[in-house]
Image (cartoon, rainbow, N blue to C red):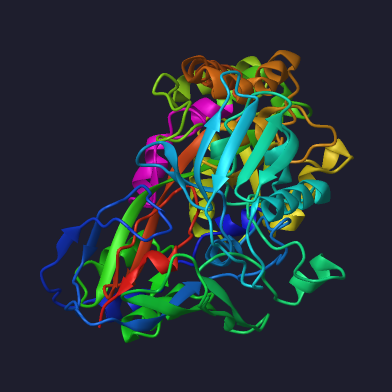
Amino acid sequence: MRNYLRVGVVVAAAALLAACAGTPPASVSSSSSAGSAAGSAAGSAAASSSAAPASSAPVNAAFTYVNNLDVVTEWDPALSYSNEVIAMNNLYEQLTRSNPTTGKVDPLLATSWTTSADGLTWTFTLREGVTFSTGAPMDAAAAKAAIERTVSLKGGAAYIWDPVDTITAKDAITLVFTLKYAAPLDLIASSAYAAFIYDTKADAGDLTAWFAKGNAAGTGPYVVESWKKGTEDELKLKANDTYWGGWEGSHYTSVVFKVVPELTTAVQLLQSGDGTFIPRVSSAIFDSLQGQEGISTLRAPSFQNLLAMLNTASGPLADANLRKAVAQAIDYDGIVTTLQGAMVKATGVVPEGLLGYTTDVQQTTDVEAAKAAVAAAGYGPDKPLTLTLTYAAGDPEEETIVTLMKANLAAVGIDLQAKALAWETQWDLAKSEDKSKRQDIFVFYWYPDYADPFSWFINLYHSANPPYFNLSYWDDPQVDATIDGLQAVTATDREKAQQEYVDLQKTISDQAISPVLGVTNYQRAFASTMTGYVDNPSYSNVVFVHDLTPTA
């Protein structure tokens, strides 16, 4: 499930800090912008590096992505909704690609598009001369078939296409979408999940079974060379020789996704030149790598936040005043300080850079008000208030935050019983039909499927029975009605949509549905020979490898 992507890296041992010590050379700051034919412009962040000398000669190098978790959990591009996003976005492409710098989307497999005044008809003109890695042409009929198959399987993030009524391949390069209600289809078509265009005729039999063997049928710059599940070098990709974007100049012509659970080992691979990119490092390691020869570091903002979903339906927190006491007891500034750059303070549910972001909703700490609310509810030394909390095992940032929360709540008279669980276990308990098995507080990360806030609201705050990701179990018909209309408003009146998102966040805050514990800063480390990297928060932890330029 989605949470797999969110599991943090293991805290490094002091031994590595010692190994990383020494007199660093002078470092330089730089920001880069990828400029390939694929047009994957994105938000950028400054990188500190001690760079290797650039080479003017073409370099065909191997790129090694050092990941702390297994890479592939689902091969079918229609169903993929987890870790494999880092590989799938190098094998497959969408019609468009999100550009957080401009707040718009850029052409990818579609070169242009138009929409009717009412937002109900979208016409995409496709790039000519593109083929799938199977050799079949990528035309309007093929794109229509891919999206319709994704919708029909109803898995992963297929819900993103819910506004679509019909798709018509008007001719070889013209794809027309008729919608049931207005929606920002250009954004939807850029989604990191469920928006891939693929060859539905790649296998005449069971296509899902064919994909499950480690096969791919995309238009992306790479193809699968080998997949060895359960091994360190789990996945290897090689250049797609027929890629429409071409291979002129210096490129990484092979990609290895290496599974290395221990951060200490991952950093050693980077230092030795056997690794190219580590997506997440701890703050201590990040700081220790500053200025090291041959290594660049980057701290980049993300669209990922950490939420504490409070149980509004059963248990003590069904009392809104007690929920407010929990929210007021949490030291949000203390969380940011303790994590030393790995997280920034949230304002509302929507992270900065997306429609709906606001500074009008603040996460505030008020210990005395929290104490008074707990006492007013009848709890005290003779009747202690005990709450249960669950979070994902193996994430040191979550563990640190939960430890702080336990102390924060103890200070206002609440005994917090926290359990670190495997994600599937945590999630299954939260969805249990037996409400007595559900937690009082469910801590987990969320990030959008595409660069739009709708994902938070439809998944986390719209009523759902049985529950899926609405793990506060909130059920407010008026809120549901507003959420149901958000996509249509976004497509036709963004100013009104902005206000509706802000109003929803005020309601969520006022009722203490889900205190936002912070917004993640990605702390990345990579080889200085890897140039042209631009961090795109719309595609969590994805490196668009073809856009990079390796240097000698």
Observer-nearest residue: 311 or 93?
Answer: 93
Which of the 4 image quadrants contains residue 424?
Answer: bottom right
Q: Residue at x 71, y 16 (%)?
A: 481
Q: Residue at x 22, y 62 (%)?
A: 48
Seen as rendered, the residue at the extreme left is: 26
Range covered by the magenta-colored residues = 326-349
Residue 192: x and y, percent? 57, 51
In this view of the protein, can residue 355 be seen by the observer?
Answer: yes
Rendered view: 132 above or below 100? below
Rendered view: 38 above or below 120? below
Observer-nearest residue: 478 or 55?
Answer: 55
Which of the 4 image quadrants contains residue 24?
Answer: bottom left
Assess whether residue 220 is covered by the magenta stretch: no
Residue 131: x and y, percent? 59, 66
In this view of the protein, can residue 1 be seen by the observer?
Answer: no
Residue 528: x and y, percent? 26, 73
Rendered view: 507 above or below 249? above
Assess whether residue 328 is covered by the magenta stretch: yes
Q: Is residue 114 left or right of residue 20?
A: right
Residue 2: x and y, percent? 65, 53
Q: Residue at x 71, y 65 (%)?
A: 74
Q: Is residue 324 left or right of residue 293?
A: right
Observer-nearest residue: 345 or 358?
Answer: 358
Q: Quadrant location of the N terminus?
A: bottom right
